Image (tube, rainbow, N blue to C red):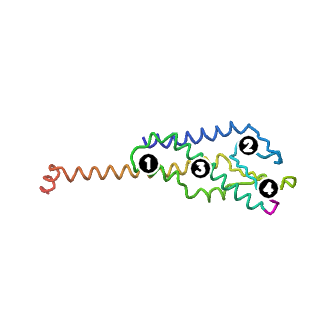
Amino acid sequence: MLEGLALSLVKTLATFLFDKYLRSTEQVKVDGAPSWYYTQEDRKVCTYTFIDGDYRYIDYAKQLNRKAMEKEIQSITEKTIYENMSYVKGERELSIVNNFRKDRELPTFVKAKIEYPKISYENEVNRVFVKGCIDKEVIYNYEKRKLQAITKSISLYHSNSAFDEMDEKYHGNSLFEELEEGF
């Protein structure tokens, strides 16, 4: 069952990233924005931000873009979990899956992996526009690594529970107690 859960989560993640690819053919034109704004790339997950102000706001706009990417990856994670929660049973298992949901490493991951292929200051509208992207394969591998860690945690939980249950049965069985007394 555990392997089925992990496989299902990975499958949903891959499907979601493919779905993002299919939607990447859409283009949105925003007045005053450069032509590349909101144009998706086939093999990347991209986020777009802008901030009113001059070129001195570029670093702040990049910071906003990193936050937008964190939210985008978090939404991928939420969708993956939502579509697979029915397989998870028990309070402890739900707790492990919820730890997957609350990813403390995500800001560090995004900061390390995000690239800014397009940054533009548009003088006419006094705005800074930023496009930040992470390769879909990199996100997939990151999420897959997290899923493997969760699968391992759930497996360890199940094996420890099984040993505890066997131990309880052993100590409560008079046949085993008689056998121990004979030694």
The secondary structure type at the circle numbered 1 is: helix
Q: Disc 4 or disc 2, which is closer to the eye?
A: 4
Q: Which residue is mark 4?
A: 128
Q: Which residue is mark 1?
A: 94
CA neighbours of label 3 inside 10 A, class few (<14), some (14 to 19), many (20+): some
Q: Is residue 74 left or right of residue 181?
A: right
- Amino acid under label 1? Leu
Quadrant position of residue 13: top right
- Image quarter (top left, top right, bottom left or bottom right) of the C terminus: bottom left
- Amino acid under label 3? Gln
- What residue is rendered at 68% in x and 39% in y? 21
The secondary structure type at the circle numbered 2 is: loop
- Amino acid under label 4? Val
The secondary structure type at the circle numbered 4 is: strand
Residue 17, magenta (yes or no): no
- Magenta stretch in the rendered image: 52-56
Q: Decide: marks 2, 3 in contact (CB < 8 A)? A: no
Q: Which residue is mark 3?
A: 74
